[in-house]
Amino acid sequence: MQPQITVILDNGASSIKAGLARGPEGDDDDQPKLISNAIVRSKGDKTTYFGHQLERCRDYSALHYRLPFEKGYLVDWDAQKAVWDGVFSSEVLNVDTAESSLLITEPYFNLPNIQDVYDQFVFEEYEFYSYHRCTPAATIPFGHLFQAGGPSPPECLVVIDSGFSFTHVVPIINNQIQWYAVKRLDVGGKLLTNQLKELVSYRQWNMMDETYIMNHAKETCCYVSTGFFEDLETCRSNPKKNSIVREYVLPNFSINRPGRIRLPNEELSTTDQVLHMENERFTIPELLFRPDDIGLEQSGLAATVAASIALLPHDLRGMFWANIGLIGGSTNFPGFYERLSSELLSLTPVEYDLQIYRSEDAITEAYRSAIAFVNDPAFSAHVVTREEYLEVGSNASRRKFPGWQSSSAPGDADISKITQESMIEDRGQPSRKPNRSRMRTTTAPGRRR
Amino acid sequence: QAPRHVNATKQTLPSDIIIKRTKRHLEELEVTAHIHRSNYTEPSITFDGNDEGAISGKNRVRQIVSDKRHLNDPNAKKKKSSMKVRTALLYRKNLATLIEESRIASLPCHVPTYLTAAAPPPQLPPRLLCSVCGYKGAYKCKKCAMPYCDINCQGVHSETRCERRVI
């Protein structure tokens, strides 16, 4: 009997976005529950919190995190099982896993030995009836990220997924990820928070153990600058009082007051400690665009996008440049969209349009697209059932979840079909170019090709 | 005429040490739980403090933290996990070991893998930022090659950080 309930688990390294799809007869959870994917020990509270229990924490200072993920991949199954037990229990989703189906997300280029362990936990430990495992970008074509550009999602699109561990550029054709063109930038929220901790610890207060507080400071104060050297000069000209400096008042957990930015003319009591955030505000997120600032030998995000699209079939590149989508928490920095647009504009070939799509909530976008995917009638063809697994083991999922192992090379039958279609489209009415003023200005510096 | 003798300030730190230092710094940025500098060891192995069971040299008595939870759940089934699951729970491998075991490095070169998917190297030369204040770093320290912007920052650097970061 096909279960009615599907558990959707966007299993990220920083947070799990979890909810239920209840089939045609019931309501789906439109917004997921956000659960920290960690086992956290609080010295102040003298307690250990598993996943969702972290919201009960009172003292966020010197929190010790044990994460199931290492460098973006699930390696600590003990910790992950502890968090998942809580997620499925009556405290969060309250679901009987043996009577449900599951959609779970995995990292890009997940290792085959790790994928086998996903199967083992899903079928042997939690005994799900059936499941589907895919990357977050694979769900995006089913969602609404690109709906501003037209009623149906584009056939060729690029997803930029910038999360906790790393940032990926993922081109997709007809719902198939083009693995040979997927590129990874090893800069994510974790690296940015750690770099901020280092800078602040050297220049002001020792915050090396204060992951939670510095993460909050990063999310509140940091922004991406569009003129890096101009902003640097502004900070230099008047170190104490300029338009960029912000003071972050550190939280005081004994009186239950969270950290915040100091408002102008706000009085501070003598016990308040303050962090001066001036060039840290924009040099930290700058690492997404110039990783070589700290010696990481990789191009920035814009150059990586250009390199990825350059690997794709020549005739389709225009469609990719016109359909770039942003997901993931690290895209939430103010100014990220503007900076990426300005850098990509100078890299886009002159004959193509550039269009970047972002969502109202970058963190939950993959979850909401996954809900649409589960409700799509084609979904049931993509799941592996427990019965199949008990018969043939992990071969069932290797067959049904096509990944990078079985990737197609450029020059496939499918791709040449689209090339024909897009050529016909170009001759007829204009293709799916959005109906808004073109992004580029008239003074485009230099011509590509 | 004798050739002009340029008194260039010579960098006394060999470049391979600089590369090693950068690499170690990048690994530190990947860590999720920081240990005190004096106990610095391999950062990529996760560690959970001393309350997770006896750790005696090589024979670590591994305890499963997920079993210790007391979930007051009437639906909880007290069944034994399967062999594979128990193995996965007990023996935690780090990512480097898993990458080796997966043997993706020996796949034919047209197959894209985690190893081949890294972003291309940068096209532009790196910008030097002062290691003390963050402004444009015009000069580099003679002893340890860290950039600084002016005399004040140079003073701060040589008092606090110079040579301590050298391996």
Image: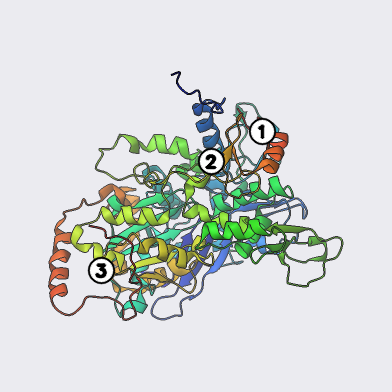
Residue for badge 3: A155
Please name the residue shown 49% across and 50% down the image: A187
* Disc 1: host chain: B
In percent of width and height, residue A261 lies at: 70, 67
In this rendering, the answer to whether B15 lies above or below A90 is above
Amino acid type, residue under disc 2 in the picture: Leu
Amino acid type, residue under disc 3 in the picture: Glu
Alpha-carbon distance for marks 2 and 3?
Answer: 38 Å
Residue for badge 2: B26
Residue B153 seen: yes
Q: Nearer the viewer, residue B114 or A424?
A: A424
In percent of width and height, residue B77 lies at: 55, 57
Residue A422 falls left or right of residue B10: left
In percent of width and height, residue A16 lies at: 52, 61
Q: Nearer the viewer, residue A2 or A212?
A: A212
Residue for badge 1: B162
- Picture quadrant where residue A274 is located: bottom right
